[in-house]
């Protein structure tokens, strides 16, 4: 039984206490009411309305096309479902980079129109001004370093980041800067486990990993990937807890057969 399982509402302060008390933080994505309700009831600590909705929900190849309006639609659906988890919303590409006033107005729209508790932004020193301005309005910010999918056209590939010393040092410096600026937690994506562990032990705020090994303060996965709803994405870090995609194919196949054979509906299933 976890130390915080009796907590009625997860806040950023609860997450900080989890780090102090050595309790790992569990985080998953969700983009809609029904699945958010289920994973909240299952006891997940943090629900991320990730801009991975761009891939998973809208079928785009990258996270770049999703808009603020689309994110607000997903996030408000999730918030309506959630009682206990902390809901964090990704700020989509083009709503905060290089313009801190735009960043603040985008973050305010997210908070006002969704009822979420925090926003997440990708990047380090390049976005510090935006982070500062959002924080100045009392909006909690989660950082995201390492593989930052909104910069895919700069990286060129989705391979592991920060293997080289120079990039690793920049990542550590960015993590320290984000902590100093006031973010309440940082996601580290697809970086060497040793580096992620070093960041987690150096920083006081929770560090949540995806493809960043076990030495961090919590883990996040994309819900549709870990449930096997998406089938084509299988990086090394992804543990599949279910294969719901195949179960759905089986159930739908059976339904089609029943309809075609006139086995559905039966006597009891009609008025
Ligand atoms: O958008 C997303 O789902 C994310 C996670 C991969 C951390 O940012």
Image (cartoon, grey):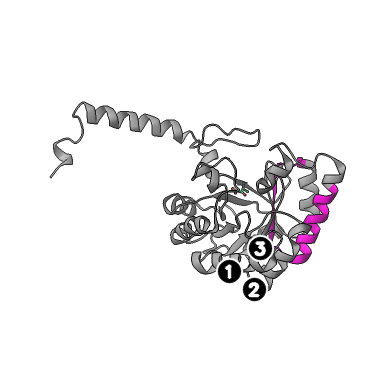
Tell me if the residue at label 1 has its CB under 8 Å from ligand 1: no
Looking at marks 3 and 1 on the same chain, the residue that comes earlier in the sequence is marked by 1
Per the model, the C-alpha gap separating discs 3 and 1 is 12 Å
Rendered view: 209 above or below 134: above
* Secondary-structure class at tag 3: strand
Which circle marks residue 176 in the picture? none
Q: Which residue is mark 1?
A: 108
The answer to whether residue 83 is magenta is: no
- Tell me whether the residue at label 3 lies in contact with that at label 2, contact meaning CB atoms closer than 8 angstroms: no
**Residue at screen point 55% across, 35% down:** 240
Q: Nearer the viewer, residue 26 or 136?
A: 136
Q: Earlier in the sequence, mark 2 or mark 1?
A: 1
Q: Name the residue located 33 percent from the left edge and 28 percent from the top edge.
A: 253
Report the span colored magenta.
Answer: 169-193
Residue at image x 76%, y 58%?
A: 126
On screen, residue 107 versus residue 82, left or right, reads right
* Residue contact at pointers 2 and 1, CB within 8 angstroms: yes
Q: Position of residue 213 (x, y in %)?
A: 71, 41
Q: Which residue is mark 3?
A: 141
> Badge 2: few (under 14), some or many (20 or more) residues near its Cα, within 10 Å?
few
User: Which of these two is toward me, 152 or 132?
Assistant: 152
Which residue is at a point 63% across and 64% down the rendered structure image? 12
Q: Which residue is mark 2?
A: 137
Mark in front: 3 vs 1: 1
């Amino acid at each position: 039984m976890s130390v915080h399982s009796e907590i009625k509402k997860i806040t950023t302060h609860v997450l900080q206490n989890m780090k102090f008390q050595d309790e790992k933080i569990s985080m998953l994505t969700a983009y809609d009411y029904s699945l958010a309700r289920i994973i909240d009831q299952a006891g997940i600590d943090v629900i991320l309305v990730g801009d991975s909705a761009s891939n998973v929900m809208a079928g785009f190849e990258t996270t770049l096309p999703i808009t603020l309006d689309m994110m607000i639609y997903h996030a408000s659906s999730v918030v309506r479902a959630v009682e206990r988890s902390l809901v964090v919303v990704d700020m989509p590409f083009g709503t905060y980079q290089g313009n801190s006033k735009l960043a603040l107005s985008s973050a305010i729209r997210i908070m006002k129109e969704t009822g979420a508790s925090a926003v997440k932004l990708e990047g380090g020193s390049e976005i510090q001004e935006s982070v500062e301005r959002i924080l100045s309005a009392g909006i909690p910010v989660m950082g995201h370093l390492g593989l930052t999918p909104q910069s895919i056209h700069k990286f060129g590939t989705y391979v592991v980041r920060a293997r080289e010393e120079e990039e690793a040092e920049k990542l550590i410096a960015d993590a320290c800067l984000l902590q100093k600026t006031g973010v309440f937690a940082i996601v580290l994506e697809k970086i060497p486990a040793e580096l992620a562990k070093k960041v987690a032990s150096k920083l006081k705020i929770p560090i949540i990993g995806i493809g960043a090994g076990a030495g961090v303060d919590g883990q996040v996965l994309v819900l549709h990937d870990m449930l096997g709803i998406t089938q084509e994405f299988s990086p090394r870090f992804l543990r599949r807890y279910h294969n719901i995609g195949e179960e759905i194919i089986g159930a739908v196949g059976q339904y089609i057969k029943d309809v075609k054979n006139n086995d559905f509906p039966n006597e009891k299933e009609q008025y």
